[in-house]
Image (tube, rainbow, N blue to C red):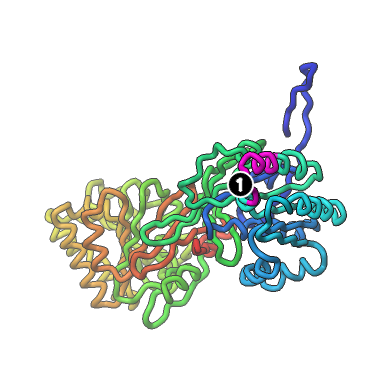
Amino acid sequence: METVCGPAGLRKSFMLKRVPTGVAGLDPMIQGGFLERSLVLVTGPPGSGKTSLCCKYLEAGASMYNEKGLYVSLIESKEALLANLLQQFGEHFSDLEECGMIHILAFPSMKGEGLPTMMDSIMATIKDVGVKRLVIDSITALSQSFTNEYESRIFTHTVLTKLVPSYGCTTLITKELQSDKDYIGNSAEDFIADGVFLLKRSDYHGRTLRELVFAKLRGTRMISPVIPFTLEGGFTAFPPFHHKAFQHMRRLKRVPDSDSHFSTGLRSLDEILGRGYPRGSLVLLEVAEAVAFSAYGVIVHSIIANLLNNGSPSVGVCSLGIDPAGSYERLAISAGENVKYTRIAEKWSKAEGDVKPYSVLLKGETPEERLAEYLAIGASLRKETGKPVIWWVALDHFVDIFGVEYAESALSQLSIDVIRHRELAHILAKPGYEYLVGTVGNMAATHLRILDRCGSILVYGVKPRTPIYDMTLDPEKGLSSAKFTPLL
């Protein structure tokens, strides 16, 4: 609901119509879409995804909302454009063009003297066909058609403020940048446009990171100023991560282990890593600053629950600040009766009466004695079940139990046990324990990093090396719905 003050000071309320973009993940971020008849500038360097976003906007309009679209190309021919879109849309975009739902007008190498004729052609098509969605690619090429900068500005201003809006189209216009760092936001088209999207493609630890920046969008409340996106399988945006998954915990769908690997419990992650985690190895999950437990817990909890579902026992050291009882309760839901083979180790510091059935208090006076007790827990469960043990360790609490000086030695001895019995140790490292990350990283067969970018959760493999993936989760479907999509 928007409120406008009239000349007499009266206030008039009305609903502004939204035009859905149809881009997966984008509309929820901008209150359902663009305001009808608005003009949005899509800017970024070559290869940043401007054409993919604009064509998806037209394709969705034609396929999902029965709205005809017009694509005006001032850069490439119609044949070249369709050929480039073949990989993203298959024959679908061409089919929509052939049946008249999408029209393409191409004016490559247009010069200033031909622009009036071009504009007549554009406006005639909009009027005759009934175009509702318009894309002009690009305003940079349009301005470069003039030899006189003053004439270029006058013509561009006329197109943006009078001709295009007068026909009722909701319009996207692209603008080329040499680099996303070149964006300043003080050009005439930036002020005229109702919205400005900046598409960024940057290098993050030698990997491609794509992000969409909402520089401006009038009349719209935006959930986040920046969201990651991918061009994999078409333009897809990723809203902030849902942190309610642990409030909708349910039985994890069991994924079988292979002779050589333990499944991560998440089929999408198994595919990325090539069947999961190798048997007889350490896994390091390195967590960046500000990543919530409900995010990194998806990866940690899934491997524990899946191995429990496959009959393996688990021996854990919870992170400081995480309630062991809560962890046990979540495992009881996701692993059922197999949770009886879970033990959570703590350094002895409380009365025996407070000990839960799953708790094991390490009472040794020295770190060496406590480590012997700790490893004995796994040996007992291994003998009882005849199955390999999953060891899950939070470094912060592990250091608290065994001490700073002995922690590295304790981890080395744990790794020897893991290799000998072809088991798995999942090590969680939060910020502040970098001095141990190098040691564990050298021992680990798998090293993952997880970070929070404006609410979106990104994951990538250091070992094995992988691209950056966005992690999404349907909170109503539980952990088994976790999906990892590369930001390519």
Expressed as whole percent of the image width and height from the top left, the position of residue 143 reads 63, 48
**Residue at the image point whose x is 25% and y is 52% from the top:** 433
**Residue at the image point whose x is 58% and y is 60% from the top:** 477
- Residue type indicated by callout 1: Met
Expressed as whole percent of the image width and height from the top left, the position of residue 11 reads 77, 22
Residue 27 shows up from this direction: no
Q: Is residue 147 inside the magenta stretch?
A: yes
Q: Nearer the viewer, residue 364 or 266?
A: 266
- Hey, which residue is sitting farthest top in the picture? 8
Q: Is residue 455 above or below residue 315?
A: above
Horizontally, is 137 left or right of 367 in the view?
A: right
Horizontally, is 176 left or right of 411 in the view?
A: right
Dominant secondary-structure state across the stretch colored magenta: helix
Q: Nearer the viewer, residue 467 or 183?
A: 183
Residue 75 shows up from this direction: yes
Expressed as whole percent of the image width and height from the top left, the position of residue 92 reads 72, 70
**Residue at the image point whose x is 78% and y is 53% from the top:** 117
Q: Is residue 255 above or below residue 145?
A: below
Horizontally, is 292 left or right of 10 in the view?
A: left
- Hey, which residue is sitting farthest bottom in the picture? 259
Expressed as whole percent of the image width and height from the top left, the position of residue 93 reads 71, 67
Determine whether the residue tagged by mark 1 lies in a helix, strand or loop: helix
State which region is magenta.
145-157
Q: Which residue is mark 1?
A: 29
Q: Nearer the viewer, residue 268 or 327?
A: 268
Q: Is residue 52 above or below residue 309?
A: above
